[in-house]
Amino acid sequence: MNYKVSIVSLGCAKNQVDAEMLLYTLEERGFTLVNDPADADAVIVNTCGFIESAKQESIDEIIELGALKREGKIKAIIVTGCLAQRYQNKITKQLYEVDAAIGIGANAQIADIVLKALAGEKTELFPDKLSLPLTGGRIPSTPPYSAYLKISDGCDNCCTYCAIPMIRGRFRSRTMEDILTEARQLANNGVKELNVIAQDTTRYGEDLYGKPQLAELLRRLCDIPKLRWIRILYCYPDRVTDELIDVMAQQDKICKYIDLPLQHCNGEILRRMNRRGNRETLSVLLKKIRDRIPGVVLRTTFITGFPGETEEQFEELAQFANDIRFERLGCFAYSQEEDTPAASLPDQIDDEVKQLRADIIMEQQQTIMAEYCESLIGRELEILCVGYDRIAECFFGRSYADAPEVDGCVFFTCGERKPTAGEFVTVRIEDYLGCDPVGIMID
């Protein structure tokens, strides 16, 4: 029988790449892939289990699919990803809708697991998480002109608030040749924008080659003719080397955009997070990056309400964000994750206080973003056209300053010539709406 399968993938872009590999494996085994879960015989939920809100989103999705199952629209629900890996046998015990719960190390066996679930056989399978395939075929879920390139998995940083090392395992890199082979194939298939991802991209190659090799990997990616933009995400501040900065500055294909999740600036808070640095050292690093990469866009994330964070330490963080004036910033209230070292620290902070502090940072950031948009007025930017917004009645796209999914867009009008999705055009910025620049296509 030709079964139809749908995948719902939640969480980060790294999880999305895993889902694309699952899709490829299923298609190779003869399953028909469908987008709408209601049209499928079996639905796979590729879950996120990073923080409480992400876990709840995964659970809500499973419950909604359970309703479709009771209506007879789908026959089986299979759960994989970080939530399944983290909670294992609890999944089927607490979510009776689930027919199979598997760890990430079982992803290569997904076709057989789906068949068992459709045959009415319950499965709980949690092999070594290091068995997760790092390489293999993918069926892209992104537009044909853009793709994520995952260069490693797992993490050895062991930040005290983070469950990723226990969920994904130790840090492990793909070989450089394997990554370059995939990148060339993506480029040959029409990808123009490559977003390089990992739990910590700056550690890439340390386990295989004895030292970080991100700078060398980027040089070699830039040699692929059909690629136009290469963007680096999820960098760790301690590993941003002079060599990496120089490569970013020298290579035209590398977007002048760097994602540095700093989490805080107070030295004592960072120490308790098992991270290094303080306000002074971070300020020096950020100044160096801006001095040596003209026009660079800095993205960061902060955590407010970490256990023991005093009002003074929070105010230091707010002042730091105001002084640095990050072009892109997200701030999240600390999530007390079970089995992480920070969960058992004393002086846990009330949820309302944590959220209020995050809201203050984000409100301050709105003003900074408005100033950044104001600075763009009159400039001509290269824009990757994404599509047409029927409500706003104009086209929209992304500049080098806009990573997919996490940042905003540039809205623009044009003359008689209409751009197509995936086309690069030049837009003169004339205004902004909220935090999104607005302009006119001039080519």
Image (cartoon, grey):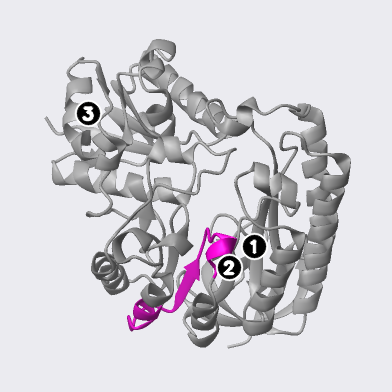
**Residue 100: x, y in percent?**
29, 22
> Horizontal placement of 397 versus 346: left or right?
left
> Horizontal placement of 322 versus 286: left or right?
right
In this picture, which residue range is highlighted in magenta? 219-240
The answer to whether marks 1 and 3 mark residues whose Cβ atoms lie closer than 8 Å is: no
Q: Quadrant of residue 428?
A: bottom right
> Horizontal placement of 294 versus 418: left or right?
right
Mark 1 or mark 3: name the one nearer the start of the chain: 3
The answer to whether marks 1 and 2 mark residues whose Cβ atoms lie closer than 8 Å is: yes
| Residue 156 on the magenta span | no
Q: Is residue 211 above or below residue 295?
A: above
**Residue 49: x, y in percent?**
49, 33
Q: Quadrant of residue 67?
A: top left
Residue kind at label 1, given as amino acid type: Arg
Numbered badge on residue 258: 2
Name the residue nearer the viewer: 303 or 312.
312
Q: Is residue 126 above or below residue 430?
A: above
Q: Quadrant location of the C terminus?
A: bottom right
Is residue 416 something one can see in this rendering? no
Q: Is residue 337 above or below residue 13?
A: above
Label 3, secondary structure: give it: helix
Mark 1 crowd level (few <14, some 14–19, many ≥20, 10 Å Cα): many
**Residue in the picture at 47% in, 20% down:** 63
The residue indicated by pointer 3 is 114
The residue indicated by pointer 1 is 299
**Residue in the picture at 50% in, 49% down:** 157
Judged by depth in the image, the label closer to the viewer, 2 or 3, is 2
**Residue in the picture at 63% in, 64% down:** 409
Disc 1 versus disc 3: distance between alpha carbons?
40 Å
Disc 2 versus disc 3: distance between alpha carbons?
39 Å
Label 2, secondary structure: give it: strand
